[in-house]
Amino acid sequence: MEIVKLDFIQIFGRMTKENLMKRVRQYFEQTQNASKVVEALVAILLRNALCRKDYSIDLLTDLIHQIFLTAEPNNTLRKHCIYFEKFFTGKAADGKEEWTTVIDRLFTNEAEYREFTKESRRYKELLEKITSEEPGSSEFTFDIVSTFTDASGKKYKWILRDTKEISDDSPNKADEVAELLPIMTTLTIFQNAKGNRRFTEFFEYECPLRRSGVKRKAKKAQSESEESAQDPQIISTPEETHATPDSTINTGNMLQKETTTTANGTGKSTLSYEKYMDKAEAMYQLAQAAPQTELKGWSAAPNPAETEQPPTSKAATSQSKGKSKGQPQLDPKKKKRKKKNKMNKKGKKWK
């Protein structure tokens, strides 16, 4: 039997909540890959927090219990377990609290537990806070266009459609979204066509369909001492660089082409969200799979065709002979007319 897919398109694409939950369950039953399922669930938690539609994972409570109470412990489970604490509120068979049992299975002591979950604790707080905010009613639709780099260092844009409103009137929320999006850099399951890790560094995000044009960049490291105390996977923001056409997928232009503006300023997409996601994903994969070719004519050596002087015309050469630098040049027609006038003075007839 062919193994079902659980990749980027399935998690952020066209599936409804119910079908996506079935797909996660089916994938685990076929592969028993607890690490990938846990990372997929973290990505779904992010989508549920930022988007207007409900993508909560409550339907998979039993599967989450099965993974964290029976699967072989590994660093992926240790790193992301904190996101699922709310699913363990009861007591285990031995009388202990379920969450205490999970910690005892995964960690040797409390210090190790704190160290592994240090980075994910902040993400968990932001996830819970933004998830609890109800999306307000609006005539506009909102997207989040974020910029990341993959493992090869190439910049590209990721578009998350139909998100909650991010207003200039709430700068704290805009900053919180900028702090939450780097959670994608902690996930290793998303890869491009060449097999490179897809999310390695977060740069910035913006909401291009909004009138206000909210835009936030990743925060820089606060100090050297604090940076050294952080987990190595917490990304510090470098100076902004300009992406070349070879390293950027122009999804922004594609977004403009596929969007029409009505008289009152509202943006209306001519493509459905599912088709648009497929198109953006296909463009990214094609750009990653395309071989890098050197542009013809681009060389550090001077181009002989550019340095060679053009040949001088015969007319220009004949006109320049016997003339001083300050003497004006006569038009050929005027010279001929002047010659004929002299002939008339001598009494000669026109030929």
Image: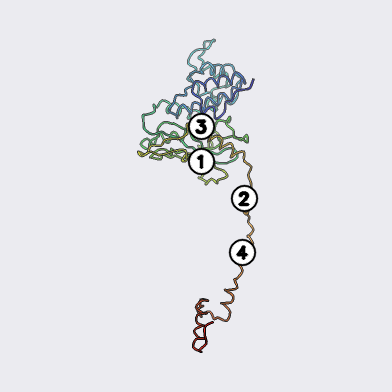
- Can residue 92 be seen by looking at this rendering? yes
Q: Nearer the viewer, mark 2 or mark 1?
A: 2
Q: Nearer the viewer, mark 3 or mark 2?
A: 3
In whole angstroms, how far apart are the C-alphas of marks 4 and 2? 21 Å
Of mark 1 and mark 3, the one earlier in the sequence is: 1
Q: Which residue is mark 4?
A: 307
Q: Please rate how many residues cluster around mark 2, counting C-alpha atoms within 10 Å: few if below 14, some from 14 to 19, many from 20.
A: few
Q: Does residue 135 sit above or below 311 in this rendering?
A: above
Circle 1/circle 3 CB separation < 8 Å: no
Do labels 3 and 2 touch, CB within 8 Å? Answer: no
Kind of residue at badge 2: Leu
Amino acid type for the residue under numbered disc 3:
Lys
Residue 28 coordinates in the image, percent (x, y): 59, 20
Tag 2 residue: 295
- Please give the name of the residue rendered at 58% of the width and 29% of the height, measured from the top-left corner: 189
Q: Which residue is mark 1?
A: 237
The secondary structure type at the circle numbered 4 is helix
Real-space Cα separation, disc 3 to disc 4, in angstroms: 51 Å
Identity of the residue drawn at 64% across and 58% down = 301
Q: CA distance from mark 2 to mark 1?
A: 31 Å
* Distance Cα–Cα, label 3 vs label 2: 33 Å
Which residue sits at x=50%, y=22%? 84
The numbered mark at residue 275 is 3
199 vs 131: above or below = below
